[in-house]
Amino acid sequence: GAGVSQTPSNKVTEKGKYVELRCDPISGHTALYWYRQSLGQGPEFLIYFQGTGAADDSGLPNDRFFAVRPEGSVSTLKIQRTERGDSAVYLCASRDGAPNTEAFFGQGTRLTVV
Amino acid sequence: AQSVSQHNHHVILSEAASLELGCNYSYGGTVNLFWYVQYPGQHLQLLLKYFSGDPLVKGIKGFEAEFIKSKFSFNLRKPSVQWSDTAEYFCAVNAGEDSSYKLIFGSGTRLLVRP
């Protein structure tokens, strides 16, 4: 597609529930990132995929968070047993993988845990 | 650990005023530097980037930034702002040795330009 697409744009869930957030990167981009942006803060890195593998997951806050990218394109961020503190905008970005290139961001998914 | 500081959280200017937004980072090695902008209701968009070469970088919409290595700074400037520049601006850094190109962002500066 023309840009990075994220669905849903908004998600409201109850505390303790499981949620999945989807990211469809720019076609051909091998690098994919997930970031989380809390109110009044800049985006914080969660996880980086190069192709199908998670090359760096050092930003995932705990084991309730998991992400996959099984075919090297679409990625899903999964959050188990959601907590109110997980409420944030989850951003996906992709990059073409070549050196010295920038990342392109999606619109984000606003997750609200009630 | 790397960090990015944007000291101005809110800036209010009148149209045609000059703009300078501060960005300082903490990392002693080679860095790649970025400014992203988020217009109301829109996604983050790249304004400009620095990887190497001329430390004065020109971006879109008349923005520029200067990398001053000795000051660990990458301040954003525009000589004359417009109402349409109202947005949130984020400085971001990536360690040059980090082949992931993952970004460390500042907390952002909200710019309001009064017509």
Image (cartoon, coloured by chain):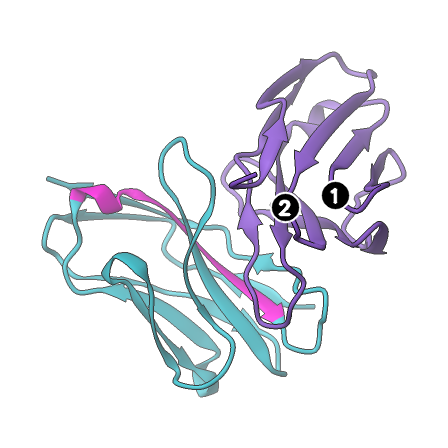
For label 1, the residue is A73
> Which hue is chain A drawn in?
purple
Predominant secondary structure, magenta span: strand
Note whether residue A114 is visible: no
Q: CA distance from mark 2 to mark 1?
A: 8 Å
Q: Earlier in the sequence, mark 2 or mark 1?
A: 2
Q: Callout 2, which amino acid?
A: Ser
> Taking B89 as reference, is B62 left or right?
left
A37 shown above or below A81: below
The letter of the cyan chain is B
Circle 2 chain:
A
Residue segment shown in magenta: B83-94
Query: Residue at point 16% right, 61% down?
Result: B18
Within the image, what quadrant is residue B16 found in?
A: bottom left
Residue visible at 51% across and 41% down in the picture: A2
Image vertical order of residue B108 relative to residue B94, above or below:
above
